[in-house]
């Protein structure tokens, strides 16, 4: 299963309000003063008047942790590790944020991205730094440590330990990130999960999902996912305490799932945590319930604690009846309905854009991608992340429409600038989503091989957004390039659509099992290059390709090896057409950029001397490189780089016997 990890591409970091933490801290230390943040002042403006209605503000004050403790003890940023039990929700209705944060505490690798190593002793200057993710960038947020206190009580998040302050300070930074504490009053779990991790959020509607809930939660937990959920709405728009102990319109953290022995069968349980830090489920499997007394499961003492800390167990059946949705967030998409898939991998293309309502054919609103191989269902995931300050329409939702169309072969050479005739021609979208969406929207698609375009259409205003398209890699490629769990995908210019690679393989293969060089030549020239003017593959070039892609070293390609070759051909075609856009031909001077743009050559570098030699080897007398020559060059470069990596013991050199050397260079 794909584990949580940072994308291979570097994520930029920006500073909110251009405040540099280290410069401000050092300035305060040099002057011997404590930092006071003028951009988020200690007054009612930063709180928001709607949160203060009906309160006696005469005793409202902003106090630093050291002053709160009055010298009786020393404040700490984190005591004995960060835990969800450190958090107790205050007057702000930000359970959506705190539930996501509670899930984050179970995944230290996520928490470390937003919490830096800070303290109230070493280099303390009353200033703290946090990070949140926004539209493809990590945003550094600087705050002072003055906290709002009313009648000697924290106005917002309460730390369970009076000496530990990371929850209060993090909440203040998030309030600044959104403009005020009042802007945290009601929100969306998907937004908080995205802000805290930058991952892909999947929303599962519990009442309409036919999938195995227990399997989904276990699969997500094993993948290191952040998991949260929300209860159904009550009779009013406010969160209401219900008879069964749950709170309506409230967010919870999913902290575990177990199968436990009960009587003569098994019971499937879900463990949840309430950000209030109290108020728990009172039904079956709650704290002190008869079910826990009757079970004799040997793990009972490990699973069950009768504590009033907001955490409780309930059966999967009761969970589905009382909760409306489950949110799962992961850096890499995972198949929650297919059980344990240990080798699942995804490719990713990331696009950031600023669009203006108007003509659908405007190129800034078109985003082309290709599905290179047929997969099982849910093989494409499209994820939108909208920049918060653009979300103005209808409160916190944004009217957004996007559609996915399959691009006909006659339009594929236009790349990402499809003409208006493409959209004026009657065509039906593969899928269309019209959503009063939050800042984030993720949708799954099941698409056949081909080229597609995503068209984004906001209703009224310009919007800056991040679009991520994830393509599931085929099974046959999962054992290759095992370090590429997430890699950039380059946009393809064209590919044949009348057949699948598998059907073509069986039509040309010997006895339906293998392709030799002669059969490969016929397939490539008659199928892959059908209708395309230009050079064709020679028999010698096909012999070279077979030798390079033939993992079993038998002079033939099986279906798995051919599928792997096909994906490389499609990608080489994209590289070739992109280089021809300016000059109309592919020149030897384009080889360096071709290497950089080729995803299966990630990490491979060449010297200028080698490039000169390759120009002599693969270009004609005018410096032009044909498409078949480019394919042979890129595939050979990959094969030779991998051969060195596999044969070298130290990564610097290798020792081969004469026969080993001859076998390597003469066959390949």
Image: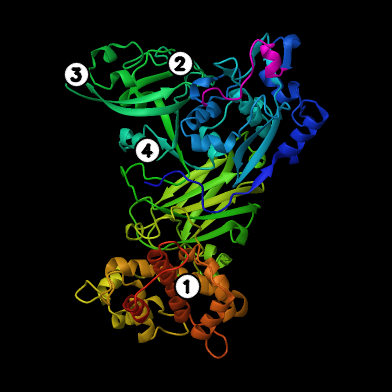
Distance Cα–Cα, label 4 vs label 2: 24 Å
Query: In this image, 7 relative to 211: left or right?
Result: right
Give percent across and percent down for residue 174: 63, 31
Q: Residues within 10 Å of mark 2 (few under 14, many from 20)?
A: many
Asked whether the residues under the numbered discs 1 and 4 touch, taking CB atoms below 8 Å apart as contact, a structural biologist would say no
Q: Would residue 614 be visible to someone looking at this image?
A: yes
Label 2 element class: loop
Q: Residue at x 55, y 91 (%)?
A: 621
Provide the residue designation for mark 3. 263
Q: Which mark is residue 573?
A: 1
Q: CA distance from mark 3 to mark 2?
A: 28 Å
Q: Residue furthest right?
A: 31
Magenta-highlighted residues: 63-82
Q: Position of residue 346 (x, y in %)?
A: 42, 53
CB atoms of marks 2 and 1 within 8 Å:
no
Q: CA distance from mark 4 to mark 3?
A: 28 Å
């Amino acid at each position: 299963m794909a584990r949580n990890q940072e994308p291979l591409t570097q994520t930029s970091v920006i500073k909110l309000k251009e405040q540099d933490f280290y410069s401000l801290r050092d300035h305060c230390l040099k002057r011997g003063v404590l930092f006071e943040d003028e951009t988020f002042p200690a007054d009612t403006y930063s709180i928001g008047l709607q949160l203060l209605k009906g309160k006696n503000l005469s005793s409202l004050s902003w106090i630093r942790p050291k002053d709160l403790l009055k010298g009786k003890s020393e404040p700490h940023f984190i005591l004995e590790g960060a835990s969800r039990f450190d958090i107790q929700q205050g007057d702000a209705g930000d359970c959506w944020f705190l539930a996501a944060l509670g899930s984050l505490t179970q995944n230290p690798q996520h928490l470390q991205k937003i919490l830096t190593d800070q303290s109230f002793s070493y280099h303390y200057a009353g200033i703290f730094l946090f990070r949140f993710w926004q539209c493809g960038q990590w945003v550094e947020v600087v705050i002072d440590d003055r906290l709002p206190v009313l009648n000697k009580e924290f106005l917002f998040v309460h730390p369970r330990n009076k000496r530990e302050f990371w929850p209060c300070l993090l909440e203040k930074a998030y309030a600044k990130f959104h403009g005020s504490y009042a802007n945290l009053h009601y929100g969306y779990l998907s937004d908080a999960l995205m802000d805290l991790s930058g991952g892909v959020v999947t929303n599962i509607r519990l009442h309409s999902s036919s999938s195995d809930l227990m399997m989904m939660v276990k699969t997500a937990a094993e993948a290191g996912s952040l998991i949260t959920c929300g209860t159904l709405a009550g009779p009013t728009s406010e969160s209401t305490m219900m008879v069964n102990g749950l709170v309506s319109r409230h967010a919870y953290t999913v902290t575990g799932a177990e199968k436990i022995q009960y009587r003569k069968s098994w019971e499937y349980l879900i463990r949840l945590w309430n950000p209030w830090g109290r108020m728990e489920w009172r039904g079956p499997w709650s704290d002190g319930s008869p079910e826990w007394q009757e079970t004799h499961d040997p793990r009972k003492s490990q699973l069950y604690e009768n504590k009033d800390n907001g955490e409780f167990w309930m059966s999967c059946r009761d969970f589905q009846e009382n909760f409306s949705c489950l949110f799962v967030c992961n850096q890499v998409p995972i198949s929650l309905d297919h059980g344990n898939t240990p080798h699942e991998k995804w490719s990713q293309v990331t696009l950031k854009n600023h669009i203006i309502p108007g003509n659908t054919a405007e190129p800034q609103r078109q985003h082309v991608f290709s599905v290179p191989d047929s997969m099982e269902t849910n093989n494409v995931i499209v994820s939108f992340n909208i920049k918060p300050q653009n979300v103005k329409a209808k409160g916190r939702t944004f009217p957004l429409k996007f559609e996915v169309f399959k691009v006909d072969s006659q339009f594929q050479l236009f790349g990402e600038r499809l003409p208006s005739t493409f959209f004026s021609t009657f065509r039906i979208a593969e899928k269309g989503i019209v959503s009063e969406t939050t800042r984030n929207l993720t949708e799954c698609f099941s698409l056949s091989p081909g080229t597609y375009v995503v068209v984004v259409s906001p209703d009224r205003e310009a919007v800056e957004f991040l679009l991520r398209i994830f393509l599931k890699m085929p099974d046959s490629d999962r054992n290759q390039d095992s370090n590429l769990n997430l890699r950039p995908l380059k946009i393809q210019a064209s590919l044949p659509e009348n057949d699948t690679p598998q059907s073509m393989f069986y039509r040309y293969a010997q006895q339906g099992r293998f392709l030799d060089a002669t059969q490969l030549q016929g397939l490539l020239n008659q199928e892959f290059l059908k209708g395309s003017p230009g050079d064709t593959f020679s028999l010698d070039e096909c012999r070279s390709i077979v030798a390079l892609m033939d993992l079993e070293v038998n002079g033939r390609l099986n279906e798995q090896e051919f599928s792997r070759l096909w994906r490389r051909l499609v990608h080489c075609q994209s590289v070739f057409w992109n280089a021809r856009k300016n000059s109309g031909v592919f020149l030897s001077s384009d080889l360096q950029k071709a290497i950089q743009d080729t995803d299966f050559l990630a990490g491979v570098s060449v010297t200028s001397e080698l490039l000169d030699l390759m120009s002599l080897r693969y270009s004609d007398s005018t410096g032009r490189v044909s498409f078949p020559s480019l394919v042979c060059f890129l595939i050979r470069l990959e094969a030779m780089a991998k051969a060195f990596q596999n044969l070298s013991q130290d990564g610097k050199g290798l020792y081969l016997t004469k026969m080993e050397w001859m076998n390597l260079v003469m066959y390949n």
